[in-house]
Image: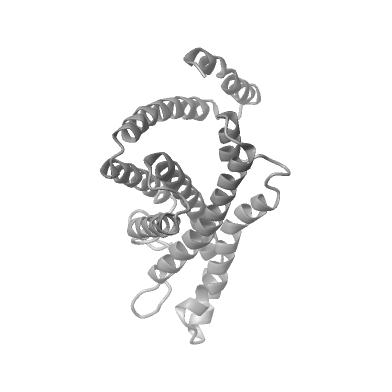
Amino acid sequence: MTFIELMTSLIFVAIPLGLALFLKLGLERDILIATVRSIVQLLIIGYILTFVFESDSPVFMLLMILLMIGAATQNIIKKGDGIPGITWMILLTLVTVETLTMGLMLGFGIIPFEPEKVIPISGMVIGNCMVLSLLFLNKFKDEVERSDEVIELILSFGGTPKAAIERSLKSAIRTSMIPTVEAQKTMGLVQLPGMMSGLIIGGADPMEAVLYQLLILFLILTTASISAVMVGYLAYPRLFNQKLQFVGLTDRKGKTT
C-alpha cells in the first residue's frame, strides 16, 4: 500500500465523521484526534520497528517491549483511580503475563527468538492484557460502589475482607473474561481474525496463518484469565485498612467514596 492509497482510505474516516456531525453525537473532535494520533503513532512505530528488526539486537527488542508495557500501564491506571497502589499492580501484572507467555513460547520452541516474531506477539499479549484490565477495573469499581453496604454487613458479622468482597470480585473477573471467551466461540465462522487475515494478505499459506492465529487465540485466553485474576486479587486488599475495616474507593484527593 502506498501513501496515496492510504490517503484514499481516509474516506472510511469521513463516513463516521459525517454521521457524528449529522446526528450531533459530539464525537467529531474525538474521531479527528483518534485518526491523527493513530497515523502519527503507527508511522513512528513503523520506523522504530524497521530499525529494531534491522539491528537484530535483543537490547532494542527488550526496550521496545518495555515501551509497550509503560504505555499500556499509563493507559490502564486512569481507570484505576480510587484504588491505592494501582500503578505497581498493573505494572506487575503486565510484566508477569509477558514474562510467563513469552518464556513458555521461547522455552518450548513455539516461536524463534527473533524481533519479527517476539515484538508483534508481545504487542498482542500486552494489548489484550491492557484491554482486559480496563474491563475488569471498570466493572470491579462499579460492583464495589453498588455493594458497599453488603460488604460492610458481612464484615460486621465477622466475615473476612475476602469473603465480604468475593462476590463482587468474581463477578468483575467473569464479566471481563466473557468477551474473550465468546469471541473465540465464533472465530472463523463470524469473523476472520486480524493476524490470520494479515498473513494471508501478505502471501502466507492459509494453513500456516491459521496455526499462528490459533497460537494468538490461546495466548489471549491466558492473558484474559491471568490479568483479571492478578489485578483483582492485588487490588481488593487495598480497599480495607489494617483493622480489616472497609474503606472503599478513594477519590483523587484521597477521600473515601
Closer to us: 156 or 222: 222
x, y percentage for residue 22? 65, 21
Q: Is residue 22 left or right of residue 137?
A: right
Q: In this view, does 188 lie above or below 204?
A: below
Q: Is residue 220 left or right of residue 37?
A: right
Q: Can residue 254 be seen in this view?
A: no
Q: What color scheme is it?
A: one colour
Name the image quarter holding the C terminus: bottom left
Q: Is residue 20 visible?
A: yes
x, y percentage for residue 126? 44, 49
- Residue pushed farthest right? 189
Residue at the spot 73% in from the left edge and 44% down from the top edge? 189
Q: Is residue 30 above or below residue 71?
A: above
Q: Is residue 24 above or below residue 4?
A: below
Residue at the spot 42% in from the left edge and 62% down from the top edge? 249
Closer to us: 173 or 206: 206
Residue at the spot 53% in from the left edge and 57% down from the top edge? 224
Write down the quadrant of residue 235 in the picture: bottom left
Count of marks placed on residues: 0
Residue at the spot 50% in from the left edge and 30% down from the top edge? 30
- Residue pushed farthest top? 4
Q: Is residue 213 above or below residue 38?
A: below
Write down the quadrant of residue 231 in the picture: bottom left
Q: Is residue 51 left or right of residue 210?
A: left
